[in-house]
């Protein structure tokens, strides 16, 4: 769940983070309530699309502002995207739902929380120093 402490001070990135946490929460609730596969598959598809766009936005900002931590940050994004792909594949192939799916979604949420609180905060400080809004 989104928390004001997650804000990195860049309005668009913060809005996207908020949306991501909301979507993950909805997915978690759908998994816990054992919602029908098509609804969950749609949520996973949207999440994949949204995450790819969001990471691209962050990477553009980092590239544009000559951020020295870009390589490491990008590697973390790639890892998350791969994990999300694995989750989608497992869901499609094995119909993972309920406990298994909610466990994976909880893991992704945990990862996103620490990513936002750590590397995104450092990136936010850099963007502020450069006066980029
Ligand atoms: Fe990031």
Image (cartoon, helix red, strand yellow):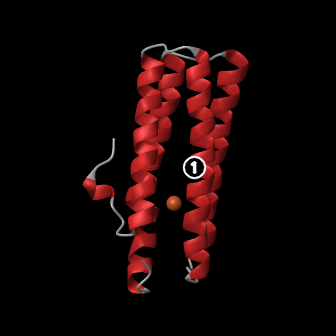
Q: Position of residue 16 (x, y in %)?
A: 45, 55
Name the residue rendered at 38%, 76% in the picture. 125
Q: Is residue 40 left or right of residue 32?
A: right
Q: Position of residue 21 (x, y in %)?
A: 41, 43
Location of mark 1 (residue): 51
Q: Is residue 78 above or below residue 91?
A: below
Q: Position of residue 53 (x, y in %)?
A: 61, 55
Name the residue rendered at 42%, 31% in the picture. 26
SS at mark 1? helix
Q: Position of residue 23 (x, y in %)?
A: 46, 38
Q: Is residue 37 left or right of residue 93?
A: left
Nearer-the-camera pick, 18 or 116: 18
Q: Quadrant of residue 128?
A: bottom left
Asked if residue 76 can be seen in this view, the reply is no
Name the residue rendered at 65%, 31% in the picture. 88
Q: Find the residue positioned furthest to the left.
A: 4
């Amino acid at each position: 769940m989104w928390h004001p402490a997650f804000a990195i001070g860049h309005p668009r990135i913060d809005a996207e983070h908020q949306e991501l946490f909301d979507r993950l929460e909805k997915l978690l609730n759908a998994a816990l309530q054992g919602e029908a596969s098509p609804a969950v598959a749609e949520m996973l598809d949207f999440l994949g699309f949204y995450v790819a766009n969001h990471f691209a936005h962050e990477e553009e900002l980092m590239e544009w502002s000559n951020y020295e931590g870009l390589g490491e940050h990008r590697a973390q994004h790639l890892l998350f995207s791969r994990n999300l792909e694995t989750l989608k594949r497992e869901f499609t192939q094995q119909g993972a739902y309920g406990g298994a799916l909610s466990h994976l979604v909880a893991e992704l949420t945990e990862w996103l929380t620490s990513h936002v609180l750590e590397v995104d905060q450092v990136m936010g400080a850099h963007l502020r120093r450069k006066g980029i809004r």
